Image: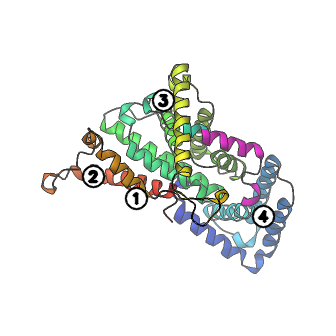
Amino acid sequence: MENPEASVSSTATRTWHDFLERMRQPSATEFVKLIKKFIVSLSNNAPDPERDAASVQEFFSNMEANFRAHPLWAGRTEEELDSASEGLEKYIMTKLFPRVFASHPDDVKTDDEFNKKSALIQQFIHPDHLEIQPIYQNETSWLQAQKELLKINTYKAPRDKLACILSCCKVISNSMFNASVSGNQNPPGADDFLPVLIYVTIKANPPQFHSNLMYIERYRNRSRLSGETAYVFTNMLSAESFILNIDAKALSMNETEFLTNMESAQAVISRLSEDYYGENVQSQSVSESSKLKVVPSVSDLENKGACTLEMEEKASEKFEKSRFLFSKAEDLTVGDVEDLLNGYRQLVIKYVCLAKGMGVLE
């Protein structure tokens, strides 16, 4: 899967700096005034996603026409004109982000529904529930795809957020293609790709995911939300819709099994929440109404797990899948390097996510 937007770090940085440099030119004074006036005008109005999106898109279109007619861009290539438009979008939307992102109660409500449902489903979902073929089941690649998707909230510009989705999909697509080549099978199609994307999205469960998708849909320059980029984004919208409406039939389960799994998942989440907030409550020098809640550290959890493991009769079974754990250096072959590297990546990602989630990693 080739898509130029997936590699934003260097290209977007050059685009951004080029735009700012041109806006500092004396001949760009009128552009600067127009941009500032638009930002102030929209910011002073009450939030209305549809109206705001229409205003932004119209402003983008008008400014692109102005760029083409201005001496600053006289004789410039289409690529340079595109860079100017990208720089404009990033500048405008970075300034307007606090005002337009998740500005509608319906979007916020859907964010909450998506996060809660994903949190429940991820407790029991298995690739087989989505009929993902065994050849395409690659947890290491899926963790990397989740990592790319979870970057979405670190950016404010629509293009940068969209690039996180594209990067996630690229990891999935490449993994599936390589698996098909190794297995001498036909390349995967859309019917193979979408279930994997759904699974990865459920496992990642990005915060404010619906608001991010709506932000991209409304404020990404529509002249650039086309082709393969639009196809990938449409797949992500489909994945979100599937997750929000997921039921027993969607997971190839009977209704009783589905409800039982959902109830069990809710019990697990409730118990984890109680443990998280209920354990290690300190009350030194504070009143009963203001007890200090201490979050267990990663080392605390490790020690607790080690003690529990020592008391289990079949503790060794927990390490059966870790085939290199008790190996000696001389037992390893060159062919083991890739498996060890993949295992190491998975371990680091899980540890960092755990530590970050527990609030013990800056």
Could you tell me if the residues under marks 3 and 1 are in contact, i.e. CB atoms within 8 Å?
Answer: no
Element type at mark 1: helix
In three-dimensional space, the C-alpha distance between marks 2 and 3, rounded to whole angstroms, equals 29 Å
Find disc 3 in the rendering and name its residue.
130
In three-dimensional space, the C-alpha distance between marks 2 and 1, rounded to whole angstroms, equals 24 Å
Q: Which of marks 2 and 1 is in front?
A: 1
Residue 172's spot in the image, x, y percent? 45, 43
Sequence-first disc among 2 and 3: 3
Find disc 4 in the rendering and name its residue.
66
In three-dimensional space, the C-alpha distance between marks 3 and 1, rounded to whole angstroms, equals 36 Å
Sequence-first disc among 1 and 4: 4
Magenta span: 97-116
Find disc 1 in the rendering and name its residue.
299
In three-dimensional space, the C-alpha distance between marks 1 and 4, rounded to whole angstroms, equals 59 Å
Kind of residue at disc 3: Leu
Give the answer, above or below, for where 136 lies relative to 14: above
Find disc 2 in the rendering and name its residue.
340
Element type at mark 3: helix
Residue 315's spot in the image, x, y percent? 27, 42
Q: How crowded is mark 4: few (under 14 residues within 10 Å), some or many (20 or more)?
A: few
